[in-house]
Amino acid sequence: MIEKGAVLPMFYLPPVEYFAALNAYKPGILIEREEHFPKQTYRNRANIYSPDGILALTVPVVRGAKNHTKIKDVKISYDFDWQRLHWLSLQACYRRSAYFEYYEDEFVQFYEKKFPFLFDYNEQLLQFILKSIKLKVELNYTESYEAEYMSLVDFRNSISPKREPDFDQKPYFQVFEERKGFQKNLSIVDLLFNQGPNAVNYL
């Protein structure tokens, strides 16, 4: 039997496609932590469904963390209160969803406590979401940067806000779908707040 596995980046509230990959390639999951921080990716950005359509939530990073800083060393900027903005946005978008209140008390803690490093913040959010959707995935981490992996499927650049997702996604109920229709590949929180415990079956 061929060992199947995949290497994935560490994202902020990753899109549904990311969790479909985690589910498909477990137990051979490798998380990239030695890459240089690339701009305009899901590493510090998530898309949610607002009354006006897709809303991007971006975690600001400290200046200078743009080009040659390893992802594990990128620091979060708190020059303005983005945590309050993100939490208010999540409440405004998902307060009417079926399961928001169910996860709210644990989830809000990620918007009250300050985390120095982006990677650590994303990792703790990921562990919380995996627990919430009851998806058992053991995460292993890269020890050095490899440009290519011969034996693993490489998702480091393919899951991107600049690309149309190429995976088939069945529609599920979304709070504002009567306005703009079903929106594909939003942050996992859209699936979690709308589907709750059924999210893992959806994946």
Image (tube, rainbow, N blue to C red):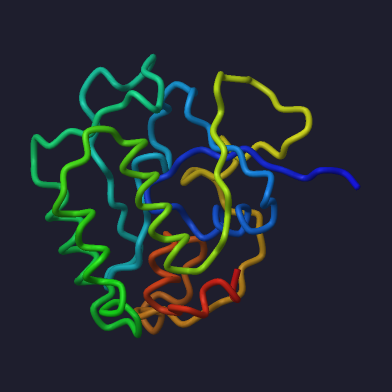
Q: Left of 126 or right of it: where is 120? A: left
**87 and 181: which one is in front?**
87
Residue 130 image position (x, y, % from top left): 47, 60
Residue 18 location (% of width, % of height): 55, 53
Depth order, front residue of 101/18: 101
Q: Viewed as shown, does residue 179 lie left or right of 172?
A: left
Q: Is residue 142 above or below residue 197?
A: above
Above or below 106: residue 56 = above
Name the residue at the left extreme: 80
Q: Residue at x 52, y 80 (%)?
A: 198
Q: Is residue 83 above or below residue 30?
A: below
Decide: is 178 above or below 123.
Answer: below
Most extreme residue toward the top is 68
Instruction: Where is residue 117? Give x, y as percent.
Output: 28, 33
Residue at image x 35%, y 46%? 45
The quadrant of the rendering that contains the C terminus is: bottom right
Asked whether, in this view, residue 8 is left or right of residue 89, the answer is right
Which residue does the image show at 87% across and 44% down from the upper left? 2
Residue drawn 42% across and 59% down?
187
Describe residue 125's horizontal placement relative to residue 8 as left or right.
Answer: left
Task: Locate residue 23: give its quadrant.
Answer: bottom right
Q: Position of residue 122 (x, y in %)?
A: 36, 44
In the figure, residue 141 lies in which quadrant?
top right
